[in-house]
Image (spheres, helix red, strand yellow):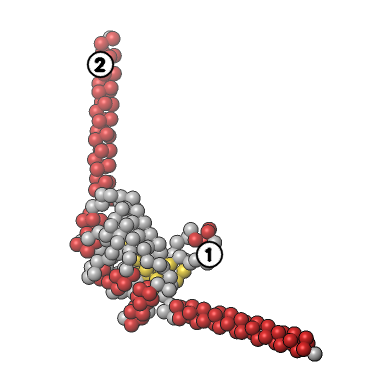
Amino acid sequence: MTLNNKQPHSTIYQKCIKMKLVILFLTLIRMVTQGIENCGCHLISNQNERTADCSNRFEINYDCLSHFKPTELTLKNNGLTEIPPQLFHYNFNNVQQLDLSYNAIKNLPDNSMHFLEDLKTFNVSCNSLKNPLELLAIRNDVEIFIANNVFKCNCEEPKLFELNERIKKQKKQKTTLYCLRDDLNETQKSIPLTAKCNNPEEPQQHWKQKAIQMGIVVIICVAILIFAKIIQDVWYACHET
């Protein structure tokens, strides 16, 4: 009787072990499959919007990612020194928002950006870009965020002013450059890309204001000298009499 009681218990135990092994095996398969499906990124798909957050990633399967056809692609803080050439090698024409901020990108490719046909928002803030004129490689109308690069991000920057002029000549009416504003408090400054810098007349207006201020100072100085001269003449006239 004892042997008969132990036999079923042993059989159940073996079945439990087998079930655990099967579950473990299926879990491993699921983990591997999920890793392939995610292409090394966090993917979210909602109706017409497909978001791929690949921030803080050093290994990204761009071939896999291109099949996901993301409309929003984030490659923030990945230590990039250039725009990944895979973006142009594979099909990423669906990308409307491309975030490359907080990297170390030094320049933009000359004739590659036009492959991103649907691009509407391009964020290259907090990089190492030296020449804003390279942004002319973007052919379509785009909101461009360029704060905190090597060049000074305001409308007094000559190359940025030239960029605005050339954008205007190319009739890119919706292309807008965004910079951080210097007249905000520290709390507001922490909110990136708050101020537009797309008015080509702003430098001229700035110098006009400077000229007016200098003119006022000169007028005040001349008035003081004239007043001092009058007082001096009156003083001498009083003493002579």
Q: Badge 1, how many Cα within 10 Å: few under 14, some, many 20+? A: few
C-alpha separation, residue under disc 2 versus residue under disc 1:
79 Å
Residues packed near mark 2 inside 10 Å, few (<14), some (14 to 19) or many (20 plus):
few
Along the line of sight, the residue nearer the viewer: 71 or 7: 71
Residue at 37%, 63% (x, y): give it. 149
Quarter that holds the N terminus: top left
- For label 1, the residue is 184
Furthest residue toward front: 240
- Residue denoted by label 2: 7
Left or right of 240? Residue 146 is left
Three-letter code for the amino acid on which mark 1 is drawn: Leu
Whether residue 225 sits left or right of residue 112 in the image: it is right
Q: Residue furthest right?
A: 241
Q: Is residue 66 above or below residue 152?
A: above
Residue 205 in the image: x percent, y percent? 48, 80
Picture quadrant where residue 179 is located:
bottom left
| Mark before the other along the chain sequence, 2 or 1 | 2
Q: Amino acid at mark 2?
A: Gln
Regarding mark 1 in the picture, which secondary structure is present there? loop
